[in-house]
Image (cartoon, rainbow, N blue to C red):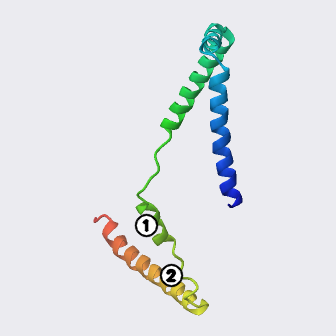
Amino acid sequence: MGKFTSFLVGTIAGAAAGFVAGSLLVTDEQLDDVKKKIKDNDTLQDLKKKYDNGTEVVKNQLASFPKNVEDDSELKDFDDIVIDDSKKDDDNTSTDNAKKSVDDLNNAEATHTTETSSEDKPKA
């Protein structure tokens, strides 16, 4: 037999022997006396009430926690936004793109200001 099997058989045999010995050595009258003493002991009853109240508080706190979210679509959307392709572009391409963007903005502002300047003036 292996060590684990021997340990398991010994544990089961020891538990069974302890249960049989306990039931034969302790009479029903002694058990009733112990139960009565526990019921009459104010300190133990206070401890039992405190334990019960504490477990209720913990249960309520655990119930108030939000459930696990199974829908991770928001996280997937965020991953799509954060993807960085800067390693694909070399430095010259990125500076050219930046210059083109600035030129486009300048041209757009110039045409917008000339169009609005003639329209915004009140006619005399």
Q: Which residue is mark 2?
A: 102
- Circle 1 SS class: helix
Q: Nearer the viewer, residue 119 or 77?
A: 77
Quadrant assignment for the N terminus: bottom right
Q: Which residue is mark 1?
A: 77
Q: Is residue 124 left or right of residue 107?
A: left
In the image, residue 74 lies at what x, y percent?
43, 61
In the image, residue 23 lies at what x, y percent?
62, 25
Give the residue at x 53% y 86%: 99
Q: Is residue 75 left or right of residue 91?
A: left
In the image, residue 19 lies at what x, y percent?
63, 31
| Whether residue 108 is situated above or below residue 9 in the rendered picture | below
Q: Nearer the viewer, residue 39 or 46?
A: 39
Q: Nearer the viewer, residue 106 or 71?
A: 71
Q: Is residue 14 left or right of residue 100?
A: right
Q: Nearer the viewer, residue 84 or 36?
A: 36
Query: Looking at numbered disc 1 in the image, what kind of residue is underneath it?
Result: Asp
Give the residue at x 56% y 31%: 58
Give the residue at x 43% y 60%: 72
Q: Nearer the viewer, mark 1 or mark 2?
A: 1
For label 2, the crowd category at 10 Å Cα-Cα, with few meaning under 14, some 14 to 19 and many 20 or more, is few
